[in-house]
Image: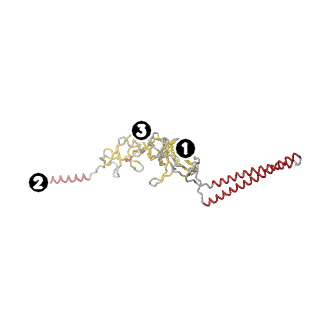
Amino acid sequence: MKSIWIKRVGLALLAVAVVAGFGWALRTRPALVDLAEVTAAPMRVTVREEGMTRVRDVYTVSAPIAGHLTRTVVNEGDLVRANNTVVAAIHPLDPPLIDRRAEAELLASRDAARAGVGVAEIDLQRAQSALKLAEDELARTIKLFGSGFVSESALQRLTNEVDLQKAAVDAAKAVIGLRNAELANAEARLLQPDPADPTGESCCVNLLAPIDGNVLSVMARSEQAVTAGAKIAEIGNVHDLEIAVDLLSTDAVSIAPGTKAEISDWGGDHALHARVRRVDPAAFTKVSALGIEEQRVTVVLDLEDTDVRLGHGYRVFVEMTVWECVRCIQVPIGALFRNGDRWNVFVVDGGRAKQTEIGIGHMNDDTAEVLTGLKPGASVVVHPSDTLVDDGLVERRD
């Protein structure tokens, strides 16, 4: 009899254990979540974009005339002095080469010019002879006029004839000068370049540095023929730098002159302070690395701090402060999720997650400003999963 009761008690205990095991297996387990605390602290919203340093005023030295540029003696980084340092020199261009046909034509023109000089000299001799004859005739007439054998009108006619012959001599001399100039022109057109002295001994035009500064780049280094306006070098003061950054037009509307900025990732061990000087009024289209057309606006900043290691065209990252507060309630961005058109978070209280609607103000990459719905010290779920429900059990993940 006793053994039967022991067996019954054992079976009862076994049944209770099985039911308890099923209950344990089917119980609702708390969801493991990551928690973050709502804090009240300083906050700021920034726009971060890659920019480039540049010299504030860059001066381009260009050729004022067409000519033969000698080899540029300055190099990038050289110090130059205003109106003192010679950047480059320009000599006259060499005469062009002459082919056989052009040479024959020029030789014929030269011979014609020489013949013209000869004709002009003969005309001069003829005019001089006629003048001498007229002067002799005038001298005899004057003697006869004194004796009363020649009328006054005849004397006057011979006097005019002498004046005309003098003018003819002067004209013949002028024609000889003209023919000699034509001959010199024809001979000059026959000149060929001298390979031993391509620039010759003629005077050159020296291009001087316009300001005190450094040579930023040299566009024409070798000896060559250049046209008027050809760029030769760029000069600027590397100690007077500004920063240019191209922002998306949607970000540029929140930037105004005077906005504070920090310059980072420029190679130094500390950030540099800067301030926005100008926001360009017009945007331009720029294709991104992904092939997307974007509307960009150039923003120019003045450096309040500087470093001698920075130069022209260096890459930097610019972080401009759009908004900031000394103390405001903020929640991590990862805790937010949308419920319709409203922002919500899961607030953990007593081991349960309460879905709470909140009002959000400014946002940056890490946190969001809380206007309504949360108080400092509250714990919220970060990156809530789709399985998390309102009033569900939760447990902090270790």
Q: Between tags 2 and 1, which lies in front?
A: 1
Q: CA distance from mark 2 to mark 3?
A: 80 Å
Work out whether mark 2 precedes mark 3 in sequence or the reverse, and give the earlier one.
Answer: 2
Disc 3, SS: strand
Work out whether mark 3 precedes mark 1 in sequence or the reverse, and give the earlier one.
Answer: 1
Q: Which residue is nearer to you in this view: 231 or 350?
A: 231
* Percent x, y of residue 266: 42, 44
Disc 1, SS: strand
Residue 68, placed above or below residue 273: below
Q: Is residue 308 left or right of residue 167?
A: left
Q: Would you name the residue on which mark 3 appears?
A: 326
- Residue type, numbered disc 2: Ser
Q: Would you name the residue on which mark 1 appears?
A: 208
Work out whether mark 2 precedes mark 1 in sequence or the reverse, and give the earlier one.
Answer: 2
Disc 2, SS: helix
The numbered disc on residue 144 is: none
Q: Is residue 135 left or right of residue 26?
A: right
Q: Which residue is nearer to you in this view: 259 or 271?
A: 271
The numbered disc on residue 3 is: 2
Q: Quadrant of residue 372?
A: top left
> Which residue in the rendered view is the most extreme toward the bottom?
101
Residue at image point 85% right, 46% down: 143
> Which residue in the rendered view is the most extreme toward the top?
326
Residue 121, placed above or below residue 59: below
Q: Is residue 141 left or right of residue 56?
A: right
- Residue type, numbered disc 3: Val
Q: CA distance from mark 2 to mark 1?
A: 122 Å
Q: Between tags 2 and 3, which lies in front?
A: 3
Mark 2 and mark 3 residues within 8 Å of each other at the beta carbon: no
